[in-house]
Amino acid sequence: MGIFEYAMQMEKDGEAYYRELAAKSGDVGLATILGMLADDEVKHYRALQEMQRAAGAEMAGTKVLADAKNVFAQMRGQTFDLDVSQIELYRKAQEIERRSQEFYAKRAKEVSNPAHEKLFLRIAEEEERHYFLLDHVIEFVSRPQTWIEDAEFTHLDEY
């Protein structure tokens, strides 16, 4: 399996995982964010597919962080009835994003075509943004648990 086939399969797997998480979420806001992440994986897949067909494919930019911020704002004040296993699924997704980011950053150094390098670096940046977003999802849904554990006088975050 070549680099493009491997990367495209990685993106397909990521999309499927996010869609599965969205279906299990039980919360419209979280399902929306997970759907946006899945849609970004589809964009990555298409850019890689195009790159495989022709040199120098460009990838459309993503608005996932800005859009997710709006969803978080709408969800503010909500509490979530999630078990630990649900949060572990988000952590697994975060780990997948970290590995994907490392994969694309490494591949960018290995290719000789500058257009391919540019696209791999761009996807690596987006995977890093996905990791960051998932970090916020995990914090957001687990706050009731950690707030009780960390309820010191210095813990004055707004909910």
Image (cartoon, rainbow, N blue to C red):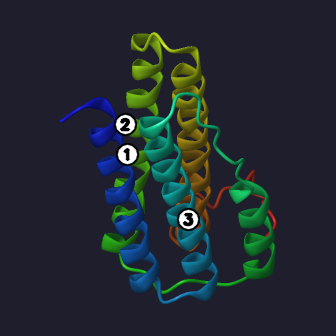
Above or below, 31 against 53 in this view is below
User: Would you say the residues marked 1 and 2 are in contact, meaning their CB atoms lie under 8 Å apart?
Assistant: yes
The mark nearer the N terminus, 2 or 3, is: 3
Q: Which quadrant would residue 129 be assigned to in this image?
A: top right
- Classify mark 3: residues with Cα within 10 Å, few (<14), some (14-19) or many (20+): some
The mark nearer the N terminus, 1 or 3, is: 3
Quadrant the N terminus occupies:
top left
| Residue at image point 44% right, 50% down | 94
Q: How far is disc 1 from disc 3 in space, using C-alphas?
A: 18 Å
Q: Which amino acid type is shown beneath numbered disc 1? A: Glu
Above or below, 66 against 47 in this view is below
| Residue at image point 35% right, 68% down | 16
Above or below, 111 against 33 in this view is above
As drawn, is 55 to the left or to the right of 155?
left
| Residue at image point 49% right, 56% down | 41
Q: Which residue is mark 1?
A: 95
- Classify mark 2: residues with Cα within 10 Å, few (<14), some (14-19) or many (20+): some
Above or below, 130 against 144 in this view is above
Query: Which of the labelled discs sits on residue 99, or is there none?
Result: 2
Where is residue 22? Give x, y as percent. 46, 78
Q: Which residue is mark 3?
A: 39
| Residue at image point 68% right, 84% down | 78
Q: Which amino acid type is shown beneath numbered disc 3? A: Asp
Could you say whether the residue bearing mark 1 is in a helix, strand or loop? helix
